[in-house]
Amino acid sequence: MREENNQLELVIKHYSELTLDELYELLRVRVAVFVVEQNCPYQEIDGKDGNAYHIFFRDSRGIEGCCRVFPDPDRPGEAWIGRVVTLLRRQGLATRLLTTAIGVARNTLHAKHISLEAQTYAKPLYEKVGFRQVSEPFLEDGIPHIQMRLDLDGE
């Protein structure tokens, strides 16, 4: 259980601004959940972190949740959100990460559209912040996923 006075700090940094300790902790959290907890051996370090803005919440214990947002190098005006993970569950942290990532995509990357690949069980989370499903389910590293998209043009 979290201590009441253990405040979460929101951090938004481009990869080039991360300290070594922050990068290490981000990777540790992602591997702990996506590889170990989900029992899914895959190449977690995929070469996309260097172009990404990393959004994370931390407290006195360390990083409690994170995600990344990066431009699509092949499609101007398109951004991707990925590696959304929280250690503090059912407390609204994932929603806060996503709304912050959407803001970074819109205001910093000047994206008109945002895409992501979601594990199918998490579809309601992404729909809550405006994403819609745009693909049939598919397997990614043995886990059912769907592609989702958020269009920012009409906002």
Image: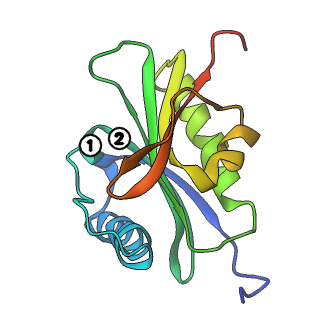
- Secondary element under disc 1, as helix, strand or loop, is loop
Q: Position of residue 48 (x, y in %)?
A: 26, 43
Q: Position of residue 61 (x, y in %)?
A: 53, 83
Q: Residue at x 39, y 49 (%)?
A: 139
Q: Which residue is mark 1?
A: 48
Residue 25 marker? none
Label 2 crowding class (10 Å Cα cut-off): few <14, some 14-19, many 20+? Answer: many
Residue type at mark 1 is Lys
Q: Position of residue 86 (x, y in %)?
A: 57, 66
**In the image, residue 148 above or below residue 14:** above
Q: Residue furthest right?
A: 4
Label 1 crowding class (10 Å Cα cut-off): few <14, some 14-19, many 20+? Answer: few
Q: Residue at x 38, y 65 (%)?
A: 26
Q: On the picture, is 26 further left or further right than 146? A: left
Q: Which residue is mark 2?
A: 52
Q: Residue at x 39, y 76 (%)?
A: 32
Q: Are marks 2 and 1 in contact (CB under 8 Å)?
A: yes
Which is more toward the observer, 103 or 95? 95
In the rendered view of the protein, which quadrant contains the C terminus? Answer: top right
**In the image, residue 150 above or below residue 82:** above
Residue type at mark 2 is Ala
Give the total number of marks visible in the rendering. Answer: 2
Q: On the picture, is 132 further left or further right than 45? A: right
